[in-house]
Amino acid sequence: MAYINVPEGLSGIRGLLAFRPETARGIGILTEELLCSDIGISRGEREIIAAYVSKLNDCFYCTTSHAATAKYHCKEDEEFVQNAINDPENSTLSLKMKALMAIAKEVQQHGQNVQQHHIDRARNEGASDIELHDAVLISALFCMSNRYVDGLGTFQPKDKTLYDSNGKVRAKEGYLASMPQT
């Protein structure tokens, strides 16, 4: 049970967004822009960054949710997604994505941990300014989202089939379609 009175039956961030639709709108727009963009890194790669940062933050709800969505963007290859978020450097991610994941890890620890050599590595693997920007902002957004979900003690179902069905919907419809209205 959440520490505040959120609508019953809504898990994770969904309950918090429904509790305060005024703030949900901004979070939803930013999430939609970052995770559903077709500029630069793919939607699946964006979801992998979100799931990876959430895993580093030990947020079960966000890790499982975004891994499930990534799976659908990555042609339902759950093993690929799990390998990418568990051990990006030894996964089959592209060299560019491995470099962006290394940056995401540094952002998750502290934004000032990102150093020129991290940027140079990503650029040498073909990362554009937009891809660098989006990887950092996705990482920062999910540090905030993870703390929001966990800091208010939200309900987080353990049944992964629920996340899988929601991930399929998010992959198809995006994030704004299910946002509470103000």
Image (tube, rainbow, N blue to C red):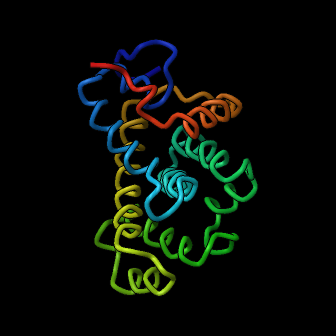
Residue 156 left/right relative to 68: left
Q: Is residue 38 visible?
A: yes
Residue ID at (67%, 53%) = 74
For the C terminus, which image quadrant? top left
Q: Which is more toward the observer, 138 or 123?
A: 123
Which quadrant of the view contains residue 117? Answer: bottom left
> Residue reaching furthest left?
22
Question: Relative to 122, does residue 170 appear above or below in the rendering?
Answer: above
Residue 49 left/right relative to 90: left
Q: Is residue 55 visible?
A: no
Question: Relative to 11, does residue 53 appear above or below in the rendering?
Answer: below
Q: Which is more toward the observer, 173 or 63?
A: 173
Q: Position of residue 5 (x, y in %)?
A: 35, 15
Picture mark count = 0
Residue ID at (49%, 63%) = 41
Which quadrant of the view contains residue 65? Answer: top right
Q: Position of residue 30 (x, y in %)?
A: 33, 44
Which quadrant of the view contains residue 108? Answer: bottom left
> Residue reaching furthest front?
38
Residue ID at (33%, 85%) = 116
Q: Position of residue 66 (x, y in %)?
A: 55, 45
Q: Position of residue 174 (x, y in %)?
A: 49, 37
Residue ID at (41%, 67%) = 131
